[in-house]
Amino acid sequence: MGRIALPVAHRLWTPAISAGVRWQCYDDPTCTDVLPSPDQTTLGAASVTAGWVTYDNRSELADLLTPDDERALARRATRSREDALGG
Protein backbone atom coordinates (compact mmCIF):
# COMPACT_ATOMS: atom_id res chain seq x y z
CA MET A 1 0.00 0.00 0.00
CA GLY A 2 1.13 3.52 -0.70
CA ARG A 3 1.65 6.16 1.89
CA ILE A 4 -0.26 9.40 2.09
CA ALA A 5 1.20 12.40 3.85
CA LEU A 6 -1.46 14.11 5.93
CA PRO A 7 -0.56 17.22 7.88
CA VAL A 8 -1.36 17.20 11.59
CA ALA A 9 -3.23 20.41 12.28
CA HIS A 10 -3.59 19.99 16.01
CA ARG A 11 -2.68 17.31 18.53
CA LEU A 12 -5.19 16.99 21.37
CA TRP A 13 -5.64 14.73 24.36
CA THR A 14 -8.75 13.90 26.35
CA PRO A 15 -9.43 11.08 28.83
CA ALA A 16 -12.89 10.43 27.32
CA ILE A 17 -15.06 11.66 24.49
CA SER A 18 -18.20 12.99 26.12
CA ALA A 19 -19.76 16.33 26.92
CA GLY A 20 -18.01 18.39 29.57
CA VAL A 21 -14.73 16.43 29.54
CA ARG A 22 -11.64 18.62 29.39
CA TRP A 23 -9.27 18.36 26.43
CA GLN A 24 -5.76 19.79 26.19
CA CYS A 25 -3.21 20.35 23.45
CA TYR A 26 -0.09 18.22 23.62
CA ASP A 27 2.15 21.11 22.61
CA ASP A 28 0.64 23.96 24.65
CA PRO A 29 -0.71 23.34 28.17
CA THR A 30 -2.59 26.65 28.08
CA CYS A 31 -4.57 25.46 25.03
CA THR A 32 -7.50 23.71 26.71
CA ASP A 33 -11.29 23.66 26.86
CA VAL A 34 -14.16 21.23 27.42
CA LEU A 35 -15.87 19.06 24.84
CA PRO A 36 -19.36 20.16 23.83
CA SER A 37 -22.33 17.82 23.82
CA PRO A 38 -22.17 15.86 20.54
CA ASP A 39 -25.77 16.79 19.75
CA GLN A 40 -24.81 20.48 19.78
CA THR A 41 -22.04 20.33 17.19
CA THR A 42 -21.89 20.67 13.42
CA LEU A 43 -20.67 17.08 13.18
CA GLY A 44 -23.60 15.92 15.30
CA ALA A 45 -26.08 17.73 13.06
CA ALA A 46 -24.42 16.35 9.92
CA SER A 47 -24.57 12.82 11.38
CA VAL A 48 -28.30 13.10 12.04
CA THR A 49 -28.93 14.59 8.60
CA ALA A 50 -27.03 11.71 6.98
CA GLY A 51 -29.09 9.20 8.97
CA TRP A 52 -26.10 7.83 10.89
CA VAL A 53 -26.84 6.01 14.11
CA THR A 54 -24.95 7.27 17.13
CA TYR A 55 -24.67 5.75 20.59
CA ASP A 56 -24.34 7.45 23.95
CA ASN A 57 -21.52 5.15 25.00
CA ARG A 58 -19.41 2.19 23.99
CA SER A 59 -21.52 -0.33 25.92
CA GLU A 60 -24.61 0.55 23.84
CA LEU A 61 -22.70 -0.41 20.71
CA ALA A 62 -21.28 -3.54 22.35
CA ASP A 63 -24.82 -4.63 23.34
CA LEU A 64 -25.85 -4.36 19.70
CA LEU A 65 -23.05 -6.77 18.75
CA THR A 66 -23.81 -9.32 21.50
CA PRO A 67 -25.09 -12.55 19.94
CA ASP A 68 -28.67 -13.57 20.60
CA ASP A 69 -29.29 -16.57 22.83
CA GLU A 70 -29.43 -20.02 21.25
CA ARG A 71 -33.24 -20.34 21.48
CA ALA A 72 -33.78 -17.07 19.60
CA LEU A 73 -31.32 -18.16 16.91
CA ALA A 74 -33.06 -21.53 16.56
CA ARG A 75 -36.51 -19.86 16.20
CA ARG A 76 -35.13 -17.50 13.57
CA ALA A 77 -33.55 -20.39 11.64
CA THR A 78 -36.85 -22.30 11.70
CA ARG A 79 -38.77 -19.28 10.44
CA SER A 80 -36.23 -18.71 7.68
CA ARG A 81 -36.53 -22.33 6.52
CA GLU A 82 -40.34 -22.11 6.58
CA ASP A 83 -40.29 -18.86 4.60
CA ALA A 84 -37.90 -20.37 2.06
CA LEU A 85 -40.25 -23.33 1.61
CA GLY A 86 -43.24 -21.05 1.23
CA GLY A 87 -44.89 -22.03 4.47
Image (spheres, rainbow, N blue to C red):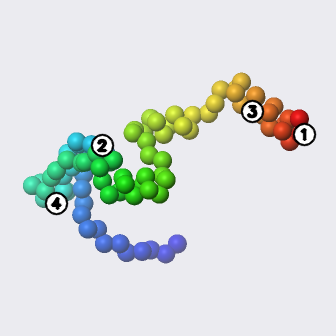
The image quarter in which residue 30 lies: bottom left
Alpha carbon separation for disc pair 2 and 4: 22 Å
Q: Residue furthest front?
A: 49
Under circle 1, the secondary element is loop
Is residue 52 shown above or below 58?
Answer: below
Look at mark 3 in the image and give the residue it sits on: 76
User: Mark number for residue 27?
Assistant: 4
Residue 47 appears in view: yes
Is residue 36 shown above or below 4?
Answer: above
Q: Identify the residue at image location x=90%, y=39%.
A: 85
Q: Mark 1 or mark 2, which is nearer the start of the sequence?
A: 2
Amino acid at pointer 1: Leu
Q: Mark 3 or mark 2, which is nearer the start of the sequence?
A: 2
Q: Nearer the viewer, mark 2 or mark 1?
A: 1
Look at mark 2 in the image and give the residue it sits on: 18
Look at mark 1 in the image and give the residue it sits on: 85
Q: How many marks?
A: 4
Residues packed near mark 1 inside 10 Å, few (<14), some (14 to 19) or many (20 plus): few
Q: Nearer the viewer, mark 4 or mark 1?
A: 1
Alpha carbon separation for disc pair 3 and 1: 14 Å
